[in-house]
Amino acid sequence: MRLSRFFVVVTFLAAVVLVGASLAQTSVAGTHTFNGHDSVPALANFTKLADFGNGNGEYPNAPLAQGTDGDLYGTTQNGPWPSNGFAFKMTLGGTFSTFDYACTENDCTGHQPYAGLVLASDGNFYGTTYEGGDGAYRSSSRYPGGTVLQLNPQSGLNTIYSFCSLVACDDGDDPFSPVIQGGDGNFYGVTPGGGANNLGTVFSVTSGGTLTTLHSFASTEGNTPYGGLIQASDGNFYGTTGYGGSGANCTDEGGCGTIFKITSEGTLTTLYNFCGQTNCADGYYPRGSLIQATDGNLYGVTIYGGANTKSGSPNYGTVFEITTAGVFTSLYSFCALTNCADGYSPAGILQATDGNFYGATYDGGASYYGTLFKLTSAGVLTTLHNFCTKGGEHCTDGEYPEALVQATDGNFYGVAQRGGISSHGTAFKVSVGLGAFVETVTASGAAGSSVIILGTNMTGASSVTFNGAAAAFKLVSSTEITATVPSGATTGPVVVTTPKGKLTSNKSFTISN
């Protein structure tokens, strides 16, 4: 595997530092408009909430996830020696508690949790660790293997599966991305290594730890998937591979990556091959998970390529759109401004309740330590925050931010991999004036099924409706409601009526058969 060339975070950050150091550290002030970029700041209020490296882990590498208690959960790559990774909880005000997932003797519980956590319908979180575990065929000499983990907010962490439990790691190796919960209740994910061809796998695993390999990648169809899966409203799963494919203008002998669709039975279709356009204007090396927007299309990012790519400097990146039928559109190419004032190497995007896309870039911006941005569906980008604009030894607001999450209070929350008081990363909040909303933990369900609804200040809720159909519900807490999907409900928004007004879901809830 070519891990030294792709998304292993430590290696990638080392490359980022070298590139940033080689460029002139020029701050760009004033108003600029260029190639669909509008740098006039929106009404964005940035607040640093906490510093990592104070017993709460070191080097956070993944987006946060909101729990039923309203708090945010995440992971860090490292912790105080000899720890090899932390899981943590943080209130919206920045107060921390931790769940230590290190195994100091033989990595039996896994370590290096790069992927972050995902909330499931049972109220627990699930994730992966990149290394370790007790798989019988893992090679301790190079630290492969990895695990699927469960975090119960009350009782702590459990390993539910260790990779390399089959000969030659045919069950997968080195999971780097998060798992997601499918409509059938099982968890789905990818590994960049292992499988029948040692080029990665797609797998499903039950909460009880029974794993099924759905697909082993081969070089011609794309391979080495680092971004996680999503399940779209059509029931199929979609993802990306970092390498492989047949992009006509790809000069990397290992390939430049693909976008694929796969069914729950394991039938895979390649939808797009990156570097299909001249000079790789469409981007290459996709990173992070795709998202499905309210228009039904899929959106994602690449860390390399784009319309502004120059010889010797490939790592600018793009935001792209693709339909579920495979029609591809480049939405934005980074480094459109002088000195890459708009940022480059995007970490990922989300669609917020205002319909716009929000995300982060690892590098570029006023000080070359990354940015936060807003992007319209028409491809107009606004920079919301430049990291490390005040300079100093440690960049107290952070360096190299990860993708954002929008919590149910309407604000965005995120982490930066480096910087802060001790240079071990920061947690922050960004407000752009968006209001509170509700979110269902599962995106779909049949009539009669139980659904967890997350929200803020829901005390006194008087009704819950699924696209207008009234549902029976129970108020568990001010941040959690459990509701039963009503008979006759149709696909559409979930609305919770509270004494302070109505809270509408950020996405439509799909009624399944």
Image: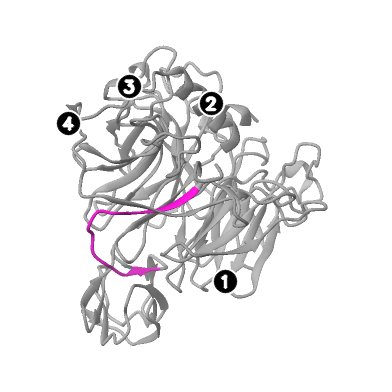
The amino acid type, in three-letter code, at marker 1 is: Pro
Label ID, residue 153: 1
Report the amino acid beneath label 3. Asn
Secondary element at image label 3: helix
In the image, taking residue 78 as reference, residue 256 lies left or right, namely: left
First along the sequence among labels 1 and 2: 2
Q: What is the quadrant of residue 482 in the picture?
A: bottom left
Q: Residue at x 73, y 44 (%)?
A: 169
Q: Which tag, 4 or 2, sits closer to the chain's start?
A: 2
Q: Name the residue nearer the viewer: 121 or 255.
A: 121
Residue 431 sits inside the magenta stretch: yes
Q: Sequence order check: which comes first, mark 3 or mark 1?
A: 1
How far across and how far down the image is residue 16, in percent? 50, 28
Check disc 3 and report the residue beneath it. 339
Q: Which residue is mark 4?
A: 31
Q: Answer yes or no: do the residues labelled 1 and 4 have beta carbons within 8 Å?
A: no
> Magenta segment range?
426-440
